[in-house]
Image: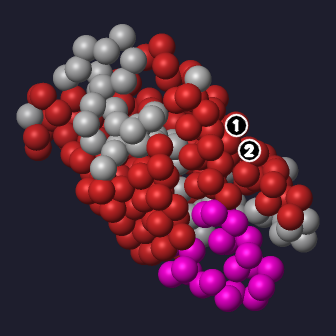
Amino acid sequence: MNKILAEFLGTFILVFAGTGAMVINQVTGGTIGHVGIALTFGLVVMAMIHAFGDVSGAHLNPAVSIAFSVAGRFPKNEVPGYVIAQLGGALAAGATLKLLFPSAHDLGMTVPRDGIMQSFVLEIILTAILMLVIFSVSSGSKEKGITAGITIGGVIALMALFAGPISGASMNPARSLAPAIMSGNFHHLWLYPVATIVGALLAIPLCRATRGPECCSGNQS
């Protein structure tokens, strides 16, 4: 249960700080700005990896847990518990922000700026890059240590900096589902879970092609 609680708390803090920065930016007339929001997402992920990486691996993302499992780095029977904890933490963060900022209607939602397919393909690519980096700096299914925290947090901040204005740079089903559900806006709800999971799975053959079969060849069950 300590792993489940770590994933719940880690994802809660990630969504609370990340989408909270978007909400506060909105209600204060842009005081945080796009760069500030991107840095918030990167910094909070880095902090959560340092806080919980040695407990649960600090996945904080259903797409990451699923990809670790398919790659053979994470027991398949632990995936449902992790995903439920991640979604629960994200929803709790969304509910908290809704309570604190009732005038913020979208609660930091991710929405396509232009065409749906543009954002769909972009999210696949972003998540594939993120997952490839995670595979490269993690041990088994655990993202832990100074290097992992800084690297993964830095990649998330980088992706949010350049792609956030187009697709929202979600890379995380829980991060996108929670604000949508709590705000009652279900437009394009399918896009982010599907694209991010596809992108995370795409990183598996990319990792094997660049780092060898041992990158993702575990036998966890």
Q: Mark 1: few, some, or many residues within 10 Å (few <14, many ≥20)?
A: some
**Image point (70%, 37%), residue name:** 88
Whether residue 22 appears in magenta in the rendering, the answer is: yes
Which image quadrant: the N terminus? top right
**Image point (30%, 25%), residue name:** 73
Residue 135: x %, y % from top left:
26, 42
Main SS class of the magenta portion in the image: helix
Give the magenta-colored segment's residue range.
17-38
Q: In the picture, residue 27 is in which quadrant?
A: bottom right
Q: In the picture, residue 151 is in which quadrant?
A: bottom left
From the viewer's perspective, is 34 left or right of 136?
right
Dot 2 lies on which element?
helix
**Image point (22%, 29%), residue name:** 216
Number of the label disc, if any, that sits on residue 119: none
Residue 153: x %, y % from top left:
40, 61
Q: Which residue is mark 2?
A: 91
Residue 5: x %, y % from top left:
61, 33
How many marks are shown on the rendered structure? 2
Q: Is residue 166 visible?
A: no
Asked if residue 214 is positioned above or below residue 111 in the image, the reply reads above
Residue 149: x %, y % from top left:
36, 56
Q: In the picture, residue 28 is in which quadrant?
A: bottom right
Asked if residue 179 is positioned above or below residue 114 in the image, the reply reads above
**Image point (52%, 43%), residue name:** 60
Whether residue 187 appears in magenta in the rendering, the answer is: no
Number of the label disc, if any, that sits on residue 88: 1
Dot 1 lies on which element?
helix
**Mark 2 near mark 1, Cβ–Cβ under 8 Å?**
yes
